[in-house]
Image (cartoon, rainbow, N blue to C red):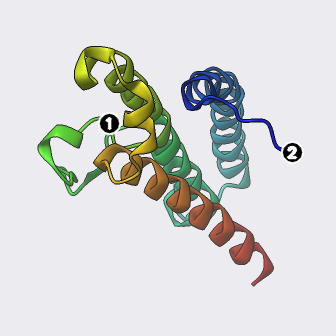
Amino acid sequence: MVAQVPLLAVNLTTACIESFFYGIFFLLTVLSVYLLVVRHNSAKTKRSIFLTPFFPSTLLIFATVTGVSIYFGGKRITLRRDLTCILQHWIVTFKRLFDALIYFNSGKTPVSYFANVRLPTEIAKTSFLVLTLFIGDSMIVSIQC
C-alpha cells in the first residue's frame, strides 16, 4: 500500500531540494557561459557567439529556470502585471510557498492552495518547466543535425 504523504510537506521539501539543485545549476551555467566565450574568442571566428546554438540556448534555459526578466527589443514580455517578475520556475516555487503559507486565507489552508492546479502560478511553473525541457531537447537535436 502506498503511504500518503502530506501535500504541504511535499511542497516544503520541493522548495529545499529545488534550491540545492538550483545552486549547482547556477554554478554550472556560469562555468558553461565562461567556457563558451573563452572557446569562441580563442577560435578567432568572425561569426557572432549569438549565432551559435549553445550560447543563446544556455541563456534561455537560465532565464526560464531562474527568474531573469526577458527582454525582446527593449520591451519586457509579460503575461499579466501580477506575474511580471515571478514567471520562471524557481521563483514561482517560492511565490507559491509564500502564497500558501501567508497570503491564502491568512495561511490557514495551505493544502487547498497547493491542491488547486488551476492557479496562474501553477500553470506558469509548469509552462516554464516544459519550455526548459523543449530548449534542452532542441540543443540535443541541433548537435545531431
Determine the residue located farthest toward the right in the rendered image: 1
- Judge whether 96 appears above or below 60 on screen: above
Disc 2, SS:
loop
Query: Which residue appears at 48% of the width and 42% of the height?
Result: 89
Which residue is under mark 1? 86
27 or 99, nearer to the observer: 99
Looking at the rendered structure, the kind of residue marked 2 is: Met
* Image quadrant where residue 15 sits: top right
Query: Which residue appears at 57% of the width and 21% of the height?
Result: 12
Q: Are marks 1 and 2 in contact (CB under 8 Å)?
A: no
Looking at the rendered structure, the kind of residue marked 1 is: Ile
Which residue is under mark 2? 1
- Judge whether 137 appears above or below 32 on screen: below
Q: Where in the figure is residue 59, as x and y percent of width and height? A: 51, 48
Q: Quadrant of the C terminus?
A: bottom right
Q: Where in the figure is residue 131, as x and y percent of width and height? A: 51, 61
